[in-house]
Amino acid sequence: MTALPYRPSLLGEVRQALRVRHLSPRTEEAYIHWIRRFVRFCGMRHPRDLRLSDVQRFLAHLAEDQGVSAATQNQAASALLFLYRRVLGRELTADGSGLQGVLHGVVMAKAPERVPTVLTAPEVALVLSQMRGVPALAVGLLYGSGIRLQELLELRVKDLDLERREIRLRRGKGQADRITVLPEGLLDPLRAHLVQVRELHDEDLARGEGSVALPDALSRKFPGASRDFGWQWVFPSRRKHVDRRTGERRRHHLDPTVIQRAVAEARRASGISKRVTCHTFRHSFATHLLENGYDIRTVQELLGHKDVKTTQCYTHVLNRGRLGVLSPVDHLLLGAARDSVNKPLATQFRSERLLISGS
């Protein structure tokens, strides 16, 4: 009896198409999630049997019934576009006849333009003063280098150049490599941390373990590299997991929720009323560099933005800060302070009782 050729499942084909294009594991996870939800929404029918109107209904359902943000809706649309164009090799038309032409009619929601939340330097110091251990070092690097949380957690020991005070980010967001600054003030804590990471790795090696997942096909090209200290995570997890593909017990990097929870607790303890997340420290890094006179192109390169327009959002933050526009009220008060005739005006505005009670 002739064996039938192997054909992977739809989601298997999606994973294969994503990995061939070297898209990140997080993108793969997100796209698989939205394709699953789309299929369930359409009554478990195969996507090749669906029409553009089904895609539009699903995206409208997310926005109107589920209340998702514009960014979430756009991510779901991107996942479905990838499914039809790259996996099924088809395009939907408005009437569903002959799946060809361009997938048109899918309205991509416009994300609102928001000014990022930025902490002042004293506020950053206050939050960091509430943190200890690995979270304190991690957040210090987020602020001191401007890197994203996921980029921080995916750092390997070899990505740190302590002598040149540089961090080399491999295949960051957008699959682009870049170099950013390693703060001199964190060199000693970082060296002490790496000593502990080395000890942990040596213990794993003594147990016959110590292997770490490598990107792409490096494990086949360099079989011993997975146990080399240079390839180990800078922030390894204390727990181990069993790799389903190899059966090896390995350490993954620290889970992002460990740092996220530490930041939330430190913000509450500091009494700061602003919304503070791990990404807030990246925003603060960029804004403080611009405040200190660094040009926007330098900041763009350090952040890894492809387009300088993305970096320009921080100039809007500057316009609202101490380097920005002087309010007309401030002009009045400055004039009143210089003019003895108008001194009652300055006194009126400085009256705390008047401002609080309105009397």
Image (cartoon, helix red, strand yellow):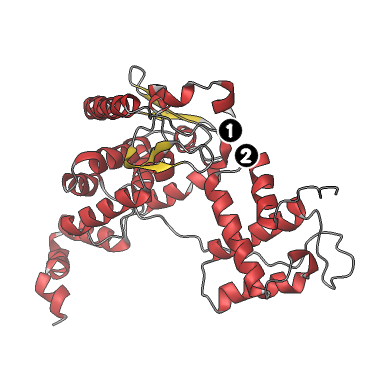
Res 180 quadrant in image = top left
Q: Mark 1 highlights which residue?
A: 216
Q: Which amino acid does label 2 sit on?
A: His
The 10 Å Cα crowd at callout 2, few under 14, some 14 to 19, many 20 or more, is: some
Residue placed under numbered mark 2 in the picture:
22
Q: Can I make out residue 301 in this image?
A: yes
Q: What element carries label 2?
A: loop
| 140 up-or-down from 111: above or below | above
Q: In this orientation, which residue lies closer to the viewer: 208 or 77?
A: 208
Instruction: Name the front one of labels 1 and 2.
Output: 1
Residue 277 falls in image quadrant: bottom left
- In the foreground, 308 or 137: 137
Query: Mark 1 and mark 2: span between their CA atoms?
Result: 8 Å
Image quarter where the C terminus lies is bottom left
Marks 1/2 in contact by CB < 8 Å: the verdict is yes
Q: What percent of the width, then of the height, locates residue 121?
A: 24, 44
The number of discs equals 2
39 vs 236: above or below: below
Residue type marked 1: Asp
Looking at this view, name the residue that lies furthest to the top. Answer: 163
Going from N to C along the chain, the mark reached first, 1 or 2, is: 2
Q: Which residue is drawn at 85% across and 73% down?
A: 95
Q: Percent position (x, y) of residue 111?
A: 55, 62
Q: Is residue 1 left or right of residue 220?
A: right
